[in-house]
Amino acid sequence: MKWVFFLEALLLACFVLLSQVTAKNSEDIRCKCICPPYREVEGQIYKQNVSLKDCNCLHVVDPMPVDGKDVEAYCLRCECKYEERSSGTIKFTIIMYLSILGLLLLYMVYLTLLEPMLKRRLFGHSQLIQSDDDVGDQQPFANAHNVLSRSHSRSNVLNKVEHAQQRWRRQVQEQRKSVFDRHVVLS
């Protein structure tokens, strides 16, 4: 239930942010003129927030580094480009990226902190603690699949993953027993 509320709040925040960006900001459009060196004037890059029709050297280069008749020769050497970007798309992409990263961090916290506490509560603290003698003999989560399969909140896919995890744990414990107790390496 909390996840549904969190997801709704996230979607509402995305909608509000995107609705505020529908109008073009002055940072979304610009004209960029790259002027190479000319006589004793060194090369420079000029940027101005102007419309597409005003994207030329005369409207963008301010202050003009040359005087009089050299202005036309200087402007002919400059290359001006009109640039436009969508800050709404950029903001949406960043929000989605941070949201997914946040969900993954929450899942990591769940796996590292909450899941062990829940398993202790379900299966008892004494079953989780093993002595060195019991490694390979006692399965701490042997009845976990049976208990969790009875629960109606778990889906079939999660039960299959849990079963595969238990099978893998049994294989690892058998390998440890073979290597450390019997000194036999499995091939």
Image (cartoon, helix red, strand yellow):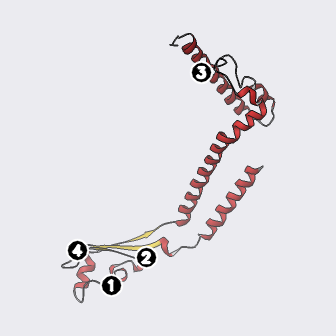
Residue type at the position of mark 2: Leu
Residue 84 percent location from the top left of the image: 46, 69
Category of crowding for the residue at label 3, using alpha-carbon neighbours closer than 10 angstroms: few (below 14), some (14–19), many (at least 20): few
Q: Mark 3 to mark 4: distance in Å? A: 70 Å
Assign a secondary structure to mark 4: loop
Asked whether the residues under the numbered discs 3 and 4 touch, taking CB atoms below 8 Å apart as contact, a structural biologist would say no
Q: Residue at x 56, y 65 (%)?
A: 88
Category of crowding for the residue at label 4, using alpha-carbon neighbours closer than 10 angstroms: few (below 14), some (14–19), many (at least 20): few
* Residue 52 disc label: 2
Residue type at the position of mark 3: Val
**Mark 3 vs mark 4: which is more N-terminal?**
4
**Mark 3 vs mark 2: which is more N-terminal?**
2
* Residue 172 disc label: 3
Residue 180 percent location from the top left of the image: 55, 15
Q: Residue at x 71, y 26 (%)?
A: 141
Q: Residue at x 49, y 71 (%)?
A: 28
Q: Is residue 28 above or below residue 120?
A: below
* Residue 63 disc label: 1
**Mark 3 vs mark 1: which is more N-terminal?**
1
Residue for badge 4:
37
Residue type at the position of mark 1: Pro
Q: Mark 1 to mark 4: distance in Å? A: 15 Å
Is 155 or 124 nearer to us in this picture? 124
**Mark 1 vs mark 2: which is more N-terminal?**
2
Image quadrant of residue 165? top right
Assign a secondary structure to mark 3: helix
